[in-house]
Amino acid sequence: MDGQRIHEWESRCVEEQPPACIAACPVHLDVRAMLGCARTGDWRGALATLVRAVPFPGIVGRICDAPCEGACRRAEAGGAVRIRALERAALEFGGPRPPPVVGKSLRKVRIAVVGAGLGGLAAAVDLARKGCAVTVFEAAERPLGRLYALGEAALPAQAIDADLAALASLGIDLRCRTPVDAAGLGELAAAFDGVYLGVGAATSGWPNLDRDGEGRIAVDPLTFATSHPKIFAGGSLRRGGAPYSPVASLHDGRYAALSLDRMVQGASLTAHREHQEPFATGLYTDVSGYLPAAPVAPAEPGGGYAADEARAEAERCFPCRCVECVKVCEYLAAHKSYPKRYVREIYNNDCIVLGNHKSNRLSNACSLCGLCEAVCPERLNMGEICLEARRSMVDKGKMPPSYHDFALRDMAFSTGDAFFLARHQPGMAASAAAFFPGCQLSASSPERVEAVYAHLRGALPGGVGLMLGCCGAPAHWSGRSGLFRETCDALAAAWEELGRPRLIAACPTCRRMLETGLPAARVETLWTTLAEVGVPARAAAGVRVAIHDPCAARDDRATQRAVRRLLTQAGASVVEIDAPERTTCCGFGGLASFVDPGLADRTVDRRIARNDADYVTYCAMCRDNFARRGKRAVHVVDLLFGGEGDAAGRPDPGFSRRQENRARLKSRLLRNVWEEPVPETATEPELILSPEVAAALERRLILHEDVRAAIRHAEASGEKIVDARTGRCIAGHRPVAVTYWVEYARQGEAFVVYRAYSHRMRVAKEAPE
Amino acid sequence: MTTETAEPALICGKCGCALETGKVEVEYLGNRFPVELPRCPSCGLVFVPEDLALGKMLDVEQALEDK
Ligand code: SF4
Ligand code: SF4
Ligand code: SF4
Ligand SMILES: [Zn+2]
């Protein structure tokens, strides 16, 4: 796979972007994680998250100007989460503060900090944590003088004392009553490895540093560098008259410390600092589904939250995530992550040369239905990635043979002589149009195909030819580009032979495949054609159905409208399940059901639970999958061309009947429409199967014809095993790549089948020793 | 891979001999393993029981497909 494209796909998924609160916080406290702990009552975890980002939680939890709350998306549903009050709660209920972790540094780096305000101390803390020896010079008699001056009501002195005490273990050398003047700053810069200048707004002087246009010390807003290579500066001195923001000072101190550390290490000052400033996040969050809830007010007015109040407030955090696609797709949910991770996983899986390919199923269980793209704010389509991965697996010979073998053999049946047919309308030498019913409608409703073809012959001028075959979708979906090409070429040849008629496809997948594979052909759907030429009147009078658009018709507005119009004209009352562009796959798409049958079943089950009415759809596989899972469902042709009988109660024909129906359709058409003598094809020997055995065969992807072949082989060659206790025979037969075992007994001319199973492993028939 | 001893009731339809457990080779995707399976001592016809085919054999097939 192409690494460049992978990167492009990966970067489109916004799920890993931070929520608005984190992006807006000047020190990017992981608010979502903190509240995640808080809502479960894990206050220790909440506190640990808090102190990782905020060295002064007691102070910040009371007086932070809380830009996070200004950005919080809960504001759209009742009011912003009271994040600051929850910080205070974390400190109150979180037990003893975890002590700061000090890293080891190889060389003793000495840093001077001028000014013991929040910014200076934040820089000192971060550098001390990195193992630097830090000396803080403060002119006043104690640090954080500005905060003590706020008064007990706003910020109790005890809270400040506690924050300072918690940092004692860092061994910062704090020298109060030690003013630093311009000359002193020069000396510090010479004596120390680096200096942070955080002296507040009022101070002037420092002639050795350049000024900006407004007379303030010129400070690079990204790196906090001044004109002196060893001196970095921040805090109020660079903000001029802006209102004091404690957390802005923390921001400056923290990121200036990062620069100082990089400076002494000789690393780039500017690299990877994109999201340092508060920013507007790209994380998409749909909040429309949340009921409004007002913020929890503490029982004690002006006081902090009690623990249960704090928990209740934390529960108001959504938390913000995107996962729009994961919410609607069983496959994406089943793999427990989201597309950004999946793309990487699929790519890594593709790159493995030796070793286990753990993510083969991840690339192959997606039904390529495009719903993710329809709901994604960035229009990311996992199906494209999965298809690309499948092609790569096939090219490298790494596609597990068991995934698609059965579906591809079924396709070969439809492209082969048993089903393939391309004819002009009888009595015509040309075809203005050709009907392409597709292999699955022919497999599911062969009589309706005959009826539709008869109707089209009567309704359209210029001759309506017929093309029976498979559009190649299984080849395309399974990543077999070569086989898909061959299939299209064969169809194209037949289409040329018919004189390039416009193609009328009954199946939306066929329509898409034909458009891709036969780009020169004009392809339309049966439904837009019928909407023009009309259908038998009021065939569906009084029927009430909920309409399911097949995923392949997701973007085909014209067909969606035509189907609705036809049904209404026929007298049916049609209700919507969902917006057509948000329809889901029935599990057959992308051959997903062959790779993860349980997942495909869950996909169908979720869909059929959406509406109690019988479903109507215009894909035979959707119809049959709904029926298979117990939902009453009809195909549009059942309503427009149906005869008597309960079409919605018709069971899924199953794989064996599908093939038989196709073959029978071909011979019936040849006999009845073209009046050719076609010999009855014998399906010998006759099998007798209990419903349980038949269901097991279906689940195990064993066709009745596979069973017949095994029995024929055993009976003809005598190669079989006899169970002396029951008198039954066991046949083993390996036509190509699968060995089938069948336990059976003769009953007259027929055979009772008791069980059948298969394996792909080849067993050598050993000669006796 | 091994399997339980063959059920004595299984008889080769061609030779009439009771199947006996013996060593045979199985192969998948170019990998070969010896296994013990019921087979005809006379003509070598081998039987793979259902639990083996749908159990261990399937597991090994899938593991090899992911190699
Ligand atoms: S919808 Fe899915 S793929 Fe798109 S950004 Fe959101 S999580 Fe990522
Ligand atoms: S709802 Fe939660 S995650 Fe979203 S912005 Fe508000 S606090 Fe942050
Ligand atoms: S199954 Fe459909 S919605 Fe889910 S990832 Fe695949 S293409 Fe997207
Ligand atoms: Zn024998």
Image (cartoon, grey):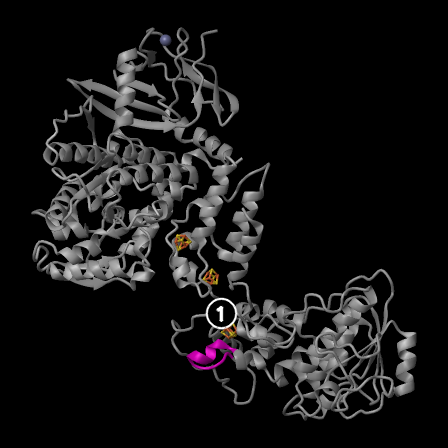
In the depicted structure, whether residue A723 falls above or below residue A433: above
Identified at 58% across, 81% down, the residue is A67
Read off the residue under disc 1: A320
The three-letter amino acid code for the residue at tag 1 is Cys
Q: Position of residue A284 (x, y in %)?
A: 48, 69
Is the residue marked 1 within 8 Å of ligand 2, measured from its CB?
yes
Task: Assess whether residue A119 is covered by the magenta stretch.
Answer: no
User: Residue A154: which quarter of the image?
Assistant: bottom right
User: Residue A22: which quarter of the image?
Assistant: bottom right
In the depicted structure, whether residue A387 falls above or below residue A762: below
Q: Position of residue B65 (x, y in %)?
A: 49, 34
Query: In the picture provided, is A80 more to the left or to the right than A408?
Result: right
Q: Position of residue A17 (x, y in %)?
A: 55, 66
Q: Is residue A482 visible to the viewer in this orientation of the structure?
A: yes
In the depicted structure, whether residue A696 falls above or below residue A364: above
The residue nearer to you, when weighing A506 against A716, is A506
Identified at 89% across, 87% down, the residue is A182
User: Residue A64: which quarter of the image?
Assistant: bottom right
| Circle 1 SS class | loop
User: Neighbour class for label 1 at 10 Å: few (<14), some, many (≥20)?
Assistant: many
Identified at 16% across, 39% down, the residue is A429
Q: Read off the magenta span.
A: A72-81
The residue nearer to you, when weighing A616 against B32, is A616
The residue nearer to you, when weighing A90 against A407, is A407
In the depicted structure, whether residue A423 falls above or below residue A32: above
Q: Position of residue A61 (x, y in %)?
A: 62, 81
Total of numbered circles in the picture? Answer: 1
